[in-house]
Image (cartoon, coloured by chain):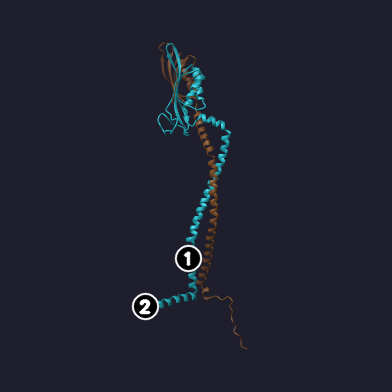
Chain colours: A brown, B cyan
Amino acid sequence: MAKKKKELINLLPQEEFAASTLGRILTWLLSTFRMIVIATEMIVMAAFLSRFWLDARNTDLNDEIKQKSAIISSYKDIENTFRKTQTKLSVFSSLTSTPTVNSFVGTISDSLPTDIILSSLAFKDRTVKINGVAGSEQSTAQLVANLTAKTEFRNIDLSGLESDRSGIGILFSISGNTGEPK
Amino acid sequence: MADWRVNYTQYRRYFFDIVSLYKRRQDLRAFLEIILSIGTITLFVALAVRPTVTTISQLLTDIKTKEDTIAQMDTKIRSLGTAQNLVTQYAGQIALLETAIPDGPTPESIMKQIEGLAQKNNVSVLGSSVSNVTIIGQYPETKENEFQISTPEGAIFFVFSGTLEGDFPLLINFLSDLENLRRPLILDGVSITTVASQDTKRIVLSVTGRAPFLKQ
């Protein structure tokens, strides 16, 4: 019996194109692009669906803002009162934080030697002018020294000194600077 | 035979050749499918993905902004609640503050207070005056010698002055009371002078100052 010719059976027949390099590259590209197309479609669908959720969320937030705006509007009077009170408090505290003229007068009174009589006392624009009659030059010097020693006054000067016409005492004039009076 | 018939036959043959070529050659089919895939992706990206992504990013930005706004509104509502409690709690003091820094100049109250303090301290009022002040209507922005906006908080002042006569301790008491009024006054000028008239000597106190108020 003649030997049967051995036949090769290929159950996975490959076409000539699929086996070639170009064929493989193209097949790979095709399958990749298919996946990209599917992914793109999924992205489009996801974006389309997510818009519903985002729109709903946006509408909810709009409603919430309207609601809270209404609440804030209802507090308008309280807010105005509070703001005005804050302004008034800051005005009040800024106006009451400076020393008073009365305290300067008290300091000058305390600094006066016994034989000095004041004829005028004036405060204006952070300056003080004191005019008076002293029993002696020493008293005037003492007053200048006393005022210079006080922290409330600066640049104390004896700006005038002359004998009284009656000859009883010495007319003096003292000027200086104060802290900002109230 | 007409030219168009020749051309028609010729082009018909070309077309069927292309179709048969497409059916016969797999590489051609593959290339065509790749080109179609690229076209589809481009179409999707240009017409669907890009506008949708733009819209979604805009929506997300809006949502983020609105969430921030709501957070700020929540904070404000909480602060307003606290403010309401404080206003209720300190209603008495706030009423006093209204008299200290009134809404509007109320120059008559200063004049009354000067007269009242003069009576209290037994000193005589020789004269008192108030600068021009708008009692009703719009306040001018700046008008020399009338309004001075000198505090950063925006308080406005009107100028007043007074001349009083009396004993020195009484005048000092008057000055002390004037400076301790509930309404804080700025005393720009104070002078105490001895005025000799005939055989007597009088002590005269002159006060020039500013009284604060807020616009109504």
Report crowding for label 1: few under 14, some 14 to 19, many 20 or more residues within 10 A (C-alpha): few
Residue denoted by label 2 = B3
Residue at image coords 51%, 53%: B59
Report x, y in % for residue A163.
41, 13
Q: Earlier in the sequence, mark 1 or mark 2?
A: 2
Q: Quadrant of residue B80?
A: top right
Depth check, front residue: A11 or B141: B141
Residue type pointed to by label 1: Gly
**Quarter occupied by the N terminus of chain A:** bottom right
Depth check, front residue: A132 or A85: A85
Q: Given the current orientation, which residue lies at the most extreme front position?
A: B136
Report crowding for label 2: few under 14, some 14 to 19, many 20 or more residues within 10 A (C-alpha): few
Report x, y in % for residue B138.
43, 34
Per the model, the C-alpha gap separating discs 1 and 2 is: 37 Å
Q: Given the current orientation, which residue lies at the most extreme bottom position?
A: A1
Read off the chain for label 1: B
